[in-house]
Amino acid sequence: AAETGINAWLRYAPVSTPKFSQSLPSNIIALNATANGPVHIAAVELQKGLAGILDHNLTVIYPVSYQPGNTTSSILVGTVAEYANTFGGAPHIPRLVDDGFWLNTTGSAIQILGHNERGALYGAFQYLLMLAQGNFSNVAYASNPDAPIRWVNQWDNLDGSIERGYGGRSIFFTNGTVVNNLNRVSEYGRLLASIGINGIIVNNVNANASLLSPENVEGLGRIADTFRPYGVQVGIALNFASPTANLTYGNLSTFDPLDPDVITWWTNVTDTLYERVPDMAGYLVKANSEGQPGPITYNRTLAQGANLFANALQPHGGILMFRAFVYDSVNLNESVWIEDRANAAVDFFTGLDGKFAENAVVQIKYGPIDFQVREPASPLFAYLRNTSTAIELEVTQEYLGQQCHLVYLPPLWKTVLDFDMRANHTKSLVRDIVAGRRFNRPLGGAAAVVNVGTNDTWLGSHLSMSNLYGYGRLAWDFASDPEDILQDWIRLTFGSDPAVLAAITNMSMSSWPAYENYTGNLGIQTLTDILYTHFGPNPQSQDNNPWGQWTRADHKTIGMDRTVSNGTGFAGQYPVEVAAMYENISTTPDNLLLWFHHVNYTQQLHSGETVIQHFYNAHYAGADTAQTFVTQWEGLEGKVDEERYNETLFRLTYQAGHSIVWRDAITNFYHNISGIADSQNRVGNH
Ligand code: GCU
């Protein structure tokens, strides 16, 4: 039964299709010879998939035993180049880019051709995931990714714990080293490949230098060997101060990025890593943020810090992901009206656009603060025009219920991806910026903090896997529709019963709005405990600390004044049209009102409600919606296997109860502080 969870959406459950079974192919011709390469995996998956879905067994023919001849009853899978070699001519297909594929089921042989081996594997998964949904229509299309970087980040510590992980211990590390048994890593690679993910950072952004010990480099090599067949390249997060950490590579007294010894040190470390992992994806660096060391320690710029690593990686073809999440979490002072953590990213990167190496990418959290339930798009996306950028998302539901709450996140991510920055008064969607299209950048894409663990469900709950699946699908095609993605995931995970499809669609699509309603609306952010757990309601914890996620709530007023005219000036970090929209209350959308403005509780919204009454109403509405998740799920009893039915029911019941805790905590807090009665008389003592 554990397999149900571990296979997630790759279950290959039987579907009935009497007609199709007449003309099923009888063999798979794997065109590329690479031992244990992605094409080999593609063949194995096709074999496994057709056996599971259609109870049909196929022989795999490898190049060594392939005799050119009749292919009518074959699935041809491999690279375009190998196809041309084998059949003496290139296929007539649309242009493919790296990782792209061509899938054609209309001819006598089924063609699955990739630009590279990885692309062929992606095509095989596309074909299988179509069949697994009972879709046997004939298709012929090319699919290319929106951007080259489609990575996941794991925040795994070497001791096996995971920062902000809610699905058990690390599948990579234990006791300071890499685990012996990497079976789960292989299973993870399979899931990631099936949604087009091509890179993974395996350790925490708050990195520990001991990852670079010879023993651990060997361990990373084993991890990379395990992911390689799936086309997933491994990278690591670095601690900027590693040269001073007394490692076997020699101990320096400085980590100044311009110091020649430091440069040599990192070059040697990088060369050593590439000896063991020749296709290493690159590095991820968090610097000068939340107590982490960085270049600013030596009065060097962030770009100088980033380029230290980019230059070491460059000869090997590696990429340096440099996080834009830079802010000072010690000295922020709420008593200063114009101080604002949201300003930090653009402030710290001011003057640095165009100063980053060509193989460096700035990885930007979707919003300016920290994975909140609602944030405006980070203005840094529009500020960096001569620098490659990627969007950072979070699958692990840190502030968003920690997998104890169903919150389907792609609709939230879309609010940022589809946002128009109006750079130079021209359409500038965030998704076109990070894809590299808008500012003609060679690199770009997405990274998501995932944090799967040893739990059989990977993330801790079956339903939360829609977020990992959805992330991969969006990173491949930023324009795709969250509800379509969701429905593919439901059919693959739970089958095609229309009642199951309808209920899970409905619950998932209403889950983020509900969560926003019962945790923190109008752009006030997730009113959770900010100091320790990031779980459960704690509105008072947001203020009077240097974390800078302030609400500035007092007896009469609430919200952050981020205007240029009277506040922190944050609104002015956007291109002029967007800046003007946020500068004025009348043009600021209600759902971001308190993000940009400090107003009276009695301020009227566009909707006609007052701020305080909206708080009351939204929290009741959100909790009401969460109650329906339980009843909707109960309607599926007998339609979902018992194990997943019960585990999910348990979580949804918890969520329903916790949403009421949230509702009452938040409404009472603001009722007490404002002294304003709920017009429907639900809140407070009466
Ligand atoms: C959040 C999170 C931290 C993490 C940080 C980051 O603040 O709570 O655990 O280290 O983000 O993204 O670096």
Image (tube, grey):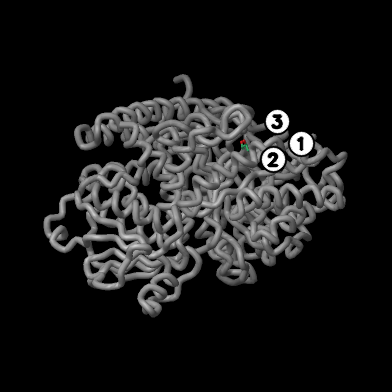
Residue toward you, 104 or 377: 104
Number of marks present in the image shown = 3
Q: Secondary structure at mark 3?
A: loop
Specify which label sits upstream in the sequence, 3 or 1. 1
Label annotation for residue 212: 2
Q: Quadrant of the N terminus?
A: top left
Q: Evaluate whether residue 404 shows in this view.
A: no
* Disc number for residue 247: 1
Q: Nearer the viewer, residue 352 or 269?
A: 269
Of badges 3 and 1, nearer the viewer stands 1
Q: Ligand 1 shows up in which quadrant of the image?
A: top right
**Badge 2: residue crowd in 10 Å (few <14, some 14–19, many ≥20):** many
Q: Amino acid at mark 2?
A: Leu
Residue that protrudes farthest toward the top in the picture: 685
Which kind of residue does numbered mark 3 sit on? Asn
Asked if the residues shown at circle 2 and circle 1 are in contact, with their CB atoms under 8 angstroms apart, the answer is yes
Which numbered circle lies on residue 288? none
Q: Residues within 10 Å of mark 1 (few under 14, many from 20)?
A: some
Q: Judge left or right: residue 37 versus residue 219.
A: left
Residue located 39% across and 26% down the image: 654
Q: Residue at x 24, y 67 (%)?
A: 138
Q: Position of residue 680 (x, y in %)?
A: 41, 32
Q: Please say if the residues under marks 2 and 3 sit with CB atoms less than 8 Å apart.
A: no
Q: Which residue is mark 3?
A: 544
Measured in 3D between alpha carbons, the distance from the residue under mark 2 to the one under mark 1, in whole angstroms, is 8 Å
Question: What secondary structure is found at the residue carrying circle 1?
Answer: loop
